[in-house]
Image (tube, helix red, strand yellow):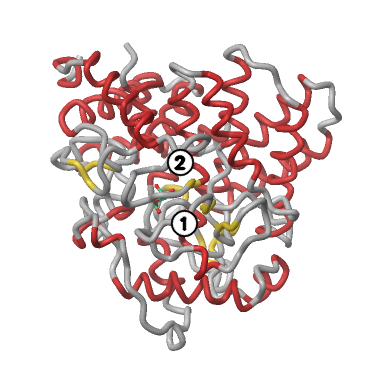
């Protein structure tokens, strides 16, 4: 029993529900009212996990609203701009991408939806043909657009596509991005969150240059795959997709569909995943598809292998987790706390993210590492107990990091960390 158990769980549950209700825009939930005023892809899917704890219909609505924004190519965008808001940059006028039912960004985000749809279906909902087809098209898009060579690893063509925006992994690959044409712009995130917690301007210039590259190439998947100055194979997206493919196959079997093609995709990803293993680092690392260079340290995504059903290096991963736990009071920091680039306050360069913890713990429990799964859950519980429900947390002192009253942290409390 840790310090998380001295907390008023009932009050926190009330607070978490209030946050979801407050962030509800009727059909989708914004991540945090001022900082992120639109629908974000994986945020919405985690929101559905939270909604399901007290309003199952609302949970399904969240997923269905996201699916409404699907592009003809199958892509599900990372941001959907259902309304106009001036508090966010870059908005729809910068992305120039309105191929789905509304305007959106031109890239995607980690595909957790199939796994959550399965979770909702198993808890009593029916498996729907329509949702199955939409997710199948999205997964196919990942394979054709982000792994055209069929290597069994997923590329991200923008750091934002990984969901882990300013991870040190992207620093070196981003150096190749030309920023001479970016021009002036005014960030809005710094109106809401301290600069010490947000990416630097040099990173932002490159984020924008990559958006401009997508616009210049009309968001055409083939042209982006061939010419993008940034293409990095990400173990995070790949692990999440591998898990999601297994859950999609489950949905397909339940519906009596032929899932042979999904099984082939699963087999390709299972074989492909080993390419992320970095023997020198003793963990799974991203690598630059343009230069072949591998990142030199692990991230929280390295621990998603069990979640993906990949158990080849389980002992080494547990050794890593042990070493990280000796550096940080709270697991799981987003980046290796022994590395020089570790920064406990700066976004994805150190802070703990509750929904990543949920995925890691789910996988560890499934492969029998219940002690570690429970340690990660009780750390998350303790963090929320002492700092409430911000975007993320300082892994060293447990303080709040990023935007306030955050949807996914509230959802993770309701569905996981807050439950006894
Ligand atoms: C940041 C995060 C991303 C998230 C978004 C909205 O960009 O890095 O993962 O989806 O905020 O919360």
Asked if ligand 1 lies within 8 A of label 2, the reply is: yes
- Residue 142 visible, this angle: no
Residue drawn at (63%, 48%) of the image: 69
Mark earlier in primary sequence (1, 2): 2
Rate crowding at label 1 as few (under 14), some (14 to 19) or many (20 or more) other CA atoms within 10 Å: few
For disc 2, the neighbor class at 10 Å (few under 14, some 14 to 19, many from 20) is many
Residue located beneath label 2 in the image: 43
The image position of residue 26, as x and y in percent, is: 49, 35
The quadrant holding residue 190 is: bottom left
Residue displayed at 69% across by 45% down:
139
- Give the vertical position of 401 relative to 318 (above or below): below
Q: Residue 243's quadrant in the figure? A: top right
Residue 53's disc number: none
- Figure check: 229 above or below 269: below
418 w.r.t. 101: above or below: above
Q: Can residue 320 be seen in this view?
A: yes
Q: Distance between the residues labelled 1 and 2?
A: 19 Å
Q: How many labels does the image show?
A: 2
The one nearer the camera, 222 or 190, is 190
The image position of residue 208, as x and y in percent, is 45, 72
Q: Where does label 1 land, which residue? A: 84
């Amino acid at each position: 029993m840790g310090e998380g158990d001295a907390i008023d769980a009932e009050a926190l549950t009330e607070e978490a529900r209030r946050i979801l209700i407050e962030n509800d825009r009727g059909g989708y939930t914004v991540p945090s009212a001022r900082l992120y005023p639109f629908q974000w892809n994986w945020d919405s899917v985690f929101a559905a996990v939270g909604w399901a704890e007290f309003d199952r219909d609302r949970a399904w609505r969240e997923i269905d609203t996201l699916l409404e924004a699907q592009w003809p190519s199958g892509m599900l965008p990372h941001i959907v701009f259902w309304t106009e808001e001036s508090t966010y940059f870059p908005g729809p006028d910068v992305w120039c991408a309105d191929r789905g039912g509304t305007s959106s960004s031109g890239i995607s985000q980690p595909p957790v939806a199939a796994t959550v749809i399965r979770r909702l279906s198993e808890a009593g909902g029916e498996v729907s043909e329509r949702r199955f087809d939409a997710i199948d098209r999205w997964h196919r898009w990942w394979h054709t657009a982000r792994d055209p060579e069929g290597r069994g690893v997923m590329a991200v063509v923008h750091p934002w596509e990984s969901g882990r925006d300013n991870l040190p992994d992207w620093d070196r690959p981003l150096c190749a991005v030309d920023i001479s044409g970016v021009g002036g712009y005014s960030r809005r995130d710094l109106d809401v969150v301290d600069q010490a917690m947000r990416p630097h301007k040099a990173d932002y210039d490159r984020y924008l240059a990559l958006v401009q590259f997508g616009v210049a190439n009309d968001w055409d998947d083939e042209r982006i795959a061939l010419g993008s100055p940034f293409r990095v194979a990400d173990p995070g997206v790949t692990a999440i997709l591998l898990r999601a493919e297994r859950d999609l196959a489950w949905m397909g079997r339940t519906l009596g569909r032929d899932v042979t093609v999904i099984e082939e995709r699963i087999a390709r990803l299972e074989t492909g995943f080993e390419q992320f293993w970095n023997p020198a680092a003793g963990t799974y690392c991203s690598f630059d598809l343009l230069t072949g260079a591998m990142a030199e340290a692990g991230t929280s995504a390295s621990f998603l292998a069990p979640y993906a059903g990949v158990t080849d290096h389980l002992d080494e991963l547990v050794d890593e987790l042990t070493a990280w736990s000796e550096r940080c009071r709270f697991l799981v920091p987003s980046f290796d706390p022994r590395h020089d680039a570790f920064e406990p306050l700066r976004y994805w360069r150190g802070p703990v993210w509750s929904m990543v913890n949920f995925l890691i713990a789910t996988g560890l429990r499934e492969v029998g590492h219940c002690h570690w799964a429970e340690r990660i859950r009780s750390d998350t519980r303790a963090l929320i107990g002492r700092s409430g429900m911000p975007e993320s947390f300082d892994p060293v002192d447990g303080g709040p990091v990023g935007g306030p009253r955050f949807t996914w942290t509230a959802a993770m409390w309701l569905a996981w960390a807050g439950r006894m």
